Image (cartoon, rainbow, N blue to C red):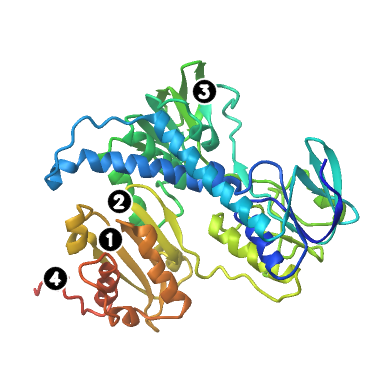
Amino acid sequence: MAEEGRYDVVVIGGGPGGYPAAIRCAQRGAKVALVEKERVGGTCLNWGCIPTKTLLASTELIARAREAEKFGVKISGIEPDWGAIQERKAKVTDTLVGGILQLLKANGIDLVEGAGSITPEKNVRVAGADGEAVLETDRIIIATGSDPAELPTFDFSQPSVMTSTDALALDHVPESLIIVGSGVIGSEFACIFSTLGTRIAMVELMDRMLPTEDSRVAKQMKSTFRKAGIEVKTETTVEEVLEYRPDGIKVKLSDGGELEAEKLLVSIGRRFNSAGLGLEEVGVKADERGRIEVNDAMETSVEGIYAVGDVVGGILLAHTATFEGLVAAENATGGKATMSYDVVPACIFTTPEIGSVGLNTDKAADQGLEVTVSRFSFGALGKAMAMGEDYGFVQLVIDAKTDKLLGAQIMGPHASDLIHEVAVAMQQGATAMDIATTIHAHPSLPEAIMEAAEAAHGKAIHVAPPRKK
């Protein structure tokens, strides 16, 4: 049974929003308990960001090895070992979980195992394997995250139907796979399993894949997937399941067609984990989908109760959750902090990678902004050509009146790293000319950002001028 006691702050949920919040509260002198029903690190570390990136690291290495001869290197006998790949994934995850546990201990935080809920007295009840305990507290931070959303069309008790969590635990590489949803998670899994030899068909309700991304990025990624043999059906849904089998599934599509595969992965977003927390009893407001309402201090409708991460909706990214957790921690311990979402980089670890921040061309148009859109292709960049990764581009969205950077989209090698140059520039209110006049090392990938900034002012050296009529 969990040990009862009194705390300055109790954090419910040990994911990327919860455990940083707990540590920051402890750093500010608070006595803290962290309640977690499964594993610290949450979805990101255990069933999301880190496991998928570890698998991608293996499949990217396989893909590069297959292209070795283009670089003058002969490699034979390339053979993926799924069991060893899974073992490495587990080792990476376990190592990081162990690191968090050490940090909690070093900061004097009590880790309480079990499911937390809020009592009418605004304390936290923990239901653990050995019984219940009540943790008395002055402040509560809710960081319970989200789970993969499910569709009523599918019976998830069938072995052929998977969520992203199930896909990470597969004991073999499926011969064929239907992916419902072509967003971030679905697209990353498509890259993983396609490289391992799985035949993949993606079904997307919207008129393009990666529907939240810039239209140019989405269009080029669909072309890339097609070249890799991945079928992407847009403006299409699964109308019904025609057959469940122990070794497969057969579905009917809205366009009249049929698809059959060994496995089907549902990847249509997340559902918010706010049920069972006792929110109604204490008056914490949440919408019909379960998203908890908060202000820019991350405080709910009830004083002294905060919420962060996926459970508040908004930008469902681990690093957003972390910053929300730090803001909540400051405020829960007497500080005064506010959360801003103006500059939040987002990354998609497909092949090639995608990095974005701020406004894209579609969002700028929706807001009626007058913008300059400037691009530079990796195909014209020396370092990208030397690496053999000269596909993709840098796109800057610039305020036409002030020259300030409003956003950027990068599709190409190390896009997840490169996007942060633009993020820092935006955070400091920099202009395109500020980047253009900053010396960038040669040969390097960041030169593409400099070239795009120069092109916005018609000064790019490596871009041919328009032909004279």
Circle 1 SS class: strand
Disc number lying in front (3 or 2): 2
Task: Assess disc 1: are there few (<14), some (14-19) or many (≥20) residues with their C-alpha within 10 Å of its C-alpha.
Answer: many
* Residue 30 screen position, x and y as percent: 76, 66
Disc number lying in front (1 or 3): 1
Mark 1 vs mark 4: which is more N-terminal?
A: 1
Mark 4 vs mark 2: which is more N-terminal?
A: 2
Query: Which residue position is annotated with label 3?
Result: 241
258 is higher (above) or lower (below) than 433: above
Are the two marked residues, 1 and 2, in contact with CB atoms closer than 8 angstroms?
yes
Task: Assess disc 4: are there few (<14), some (14-19) or many (≥20) residues with their C-alpha within 10 Å of its C-alpha.
Answer: few
Task: Assess disc 3: are there few (<14), some (14-19) or many (≥20) residues with their C-alpha within 10 Å of its C-alpha.
Answer: some
Disc number lying in front (1 or 4): 1
Quadrant position of the C terminus in the picture: bottom left
Residue type beneath disc 4: Ala
Mark 4 vs mark 3: which is more N-terminal?
A: 3
Residue type beneath disc 2: Gln
Query: Which residue position is annotated with label 4?
Result: 464
Query: Which residue position is annotated with label 1?
Result: 393
Query: Which residue position is annotated with label 2?
Result: 220
Task: Tell me the distance, in whole angstroms, between the alpha carbons under discs 1 and 4.
Answer: 16 Å
Residue type beneath disc 3: Val
Task: Tell me the distance, in whole angstroms, between the alpha carbons under discs 1 and 3.
Answer: 40 Å
Q: Nearer the viewer, residue 384 or 185?
A: 384
Mark 3 vs mark 2: which is more N-terminal?
A: 2
* Residue 67 screen position, x and y as percent: 19, 42
Q: Nearer the viewer, residue 109 or 204?
A: 109
